[in-house]
Image (spheres, rainbow, N blue to C red):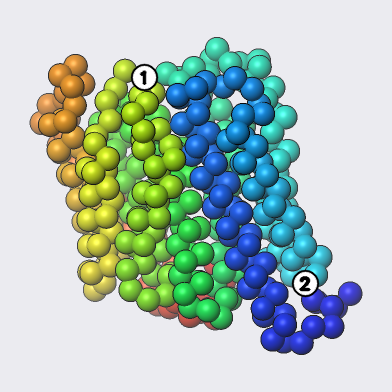
């Protein structure tokens, strides 16, 4: 069968746009369900595989997989084929995840890094990031600038949420803090890197701020958006977390001239200063930490943001514009 049957160019373009938007919506729904599932494990516990977040998660993933497979079948394009193959890996992880919880449920207590880094969880997150990364070039071909901006923003927000989820065991005020306050730089690198690329990739102004806002919306579904604590640590207030993401994002959108390593460093240090410099004021006494620890977090956030800026410039050079034909990768 020729690509998209006997449809003309306009019909093909419309079909591609609708299918891409549907796939992006389904994947973002799955990302929201994953955040909800994390909250469910904290607040309710893992009572059964058939809990509501799991059902929504896998239903949304199957919808995205069906759309990608249909796009591959109708168009024969390698882009849809790669996306379908990556998304097919995710439902296959469901039995593995169930067995892992049955065999190693005790080792995967919420106080253990394995609650984040267990093989099925890590594989799911990596496959999700891969799915969105493969979807972005398809979104980029959408003729509607507003649609490219919306669905591209949703994709980058989900990638950011996935990366920050993987950094939870390293976050200084998280339940594990494996690297102490030095771990702040890892999360800062993920934050700054995604926003730098998104700000250049998305058409129009305010791309980084849009992604930060969509990420915060997604974050309300997880434990950080509720009162549930993972273990013996405290959370900064929601308004402080909001400022720590939106203020650096605004900075990145306003300052376009400096090189990426400098913009990333500025975003990282601002994020670290707001989040780790001010959080102790709102922590209970048993969770307080000193100025030296806060300084370590701020400095490592600066370094992490700068390093992310170097990588961002390599992955998506400043010369790459935001037009659909300027690049084929995120």
Q: Is residue 325 left or right of residue 3?
A: left
Crowding near the residue tagged with mark 1, few <14, some 14–19, many ≥20 C-alpha atoms within 10 Å: some
Which residue is the extreme one toward the right? Answer: 1
Q: Give the residue at the far top of this rendering.
A: 106
Residue 115 falls left or right of residue 172: right
Looking at the rendered structure, the secondary structure element under dot 2 is helix
Give me the residue at 19% from left, 26% from top.
283
Q: Position of residue 328 (x, y in %)?
A: 57, 72
Q: Residue at x 59, y 19 (%)?
A: 47
Residue denoted by label 2 = 75
The N terminus is located in which quarter?
A: bottom right
Looking at the image, which is closer to me, 19 or 323? Answer: 19
The kind of secondary structure element at disc 1 is loop
Percent x, y of residue 105: 58, 16
Q: Is residue 172 left or right of residue 112?
A: left
Residue at the image position 81 percent from the left and 65 percent from the top:
73
Query: Total marks drawn?
Result: 2
Residue 278 - label: none
Can you identify the residue that label 1 sits on? 231
Is residue 38 visible in the rendered image? The answer is: yes
Lower position in the chain sequence, tag 2 or tag 1: 2
Left/right placement of residue 69 relative to residue 298 reads: right
Measured from the top left, where is residue 258 in percent x and y?
23, 69
- Which residue ends up furthest to the left in the rendered image? 291
Q: Tell me if residue 36 comes above or below residue 283 in the rendering.
A: below
């Amino acid at each position: 069968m020729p690509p998209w049957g006997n449809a003309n160019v306009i019909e093909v373009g419309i079909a591609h746009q609708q299918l891409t938007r549907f796939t992006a919506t389904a994947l973002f729904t799955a990302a929201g369900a994953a955040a909800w599932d994390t909250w469910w494990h904290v607040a309710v516990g893992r009572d059964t595989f058939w809990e509501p977040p799991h059902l929504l998660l896998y239903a949304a993933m199957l919808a995205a997989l069906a759309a990608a497979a249909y796009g591959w079948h109708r168009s024969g394009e390698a882009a849809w084929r790669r996306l379908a193959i990556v998304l097919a890996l995710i439902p296959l992880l469901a039995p593995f995840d169930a067995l892992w919880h049955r065999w190693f449920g005790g080792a995967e207590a919420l106080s253990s890094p394995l609650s984040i880094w267990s093989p099925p969880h890590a594989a799911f997150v990596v496959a999700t990031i891969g799915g969105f990364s493969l979807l972005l070039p398809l979104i980029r071909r959408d003729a509607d600038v507003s649609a490219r901006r919306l669905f591209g923003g949703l994709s980058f927000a989900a990638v950011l949420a996935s990366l920050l989820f993987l950094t939870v065991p390293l976050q200084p005020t998280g339940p594990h803090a494996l690297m102490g306050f030095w771990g702040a730089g890892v999360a800062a690198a993920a934050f700054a890197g995604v926003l730098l690329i998104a700000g250049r990739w998305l058409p129009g102004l305010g791309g980084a701020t849009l992604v930060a806002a969509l990420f915060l919306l997604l974050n309300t579904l997880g434990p950080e958006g509720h009162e549930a604590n993972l273990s013996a640590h405290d959370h900064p207030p929601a308004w402080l977390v909001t400022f720590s993401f939106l203020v650096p994002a605004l900075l990145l959108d306003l300052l376009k001239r400096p090189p990426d390593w400098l913009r990333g460093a500025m975003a990282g240090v601002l994020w670290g200063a707001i989040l780790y410099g001010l959080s102790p004021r709102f922590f209970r006494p048993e969770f307080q930490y000193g100025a030296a620890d806060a300084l370590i977090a701020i400095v490592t956030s600066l370094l992490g943001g700068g390093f992310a800026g170097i990588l961002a410039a390599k992955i998506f050079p400043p010369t790459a514009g935001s037009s659909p034909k300027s690049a084929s990768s995120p």
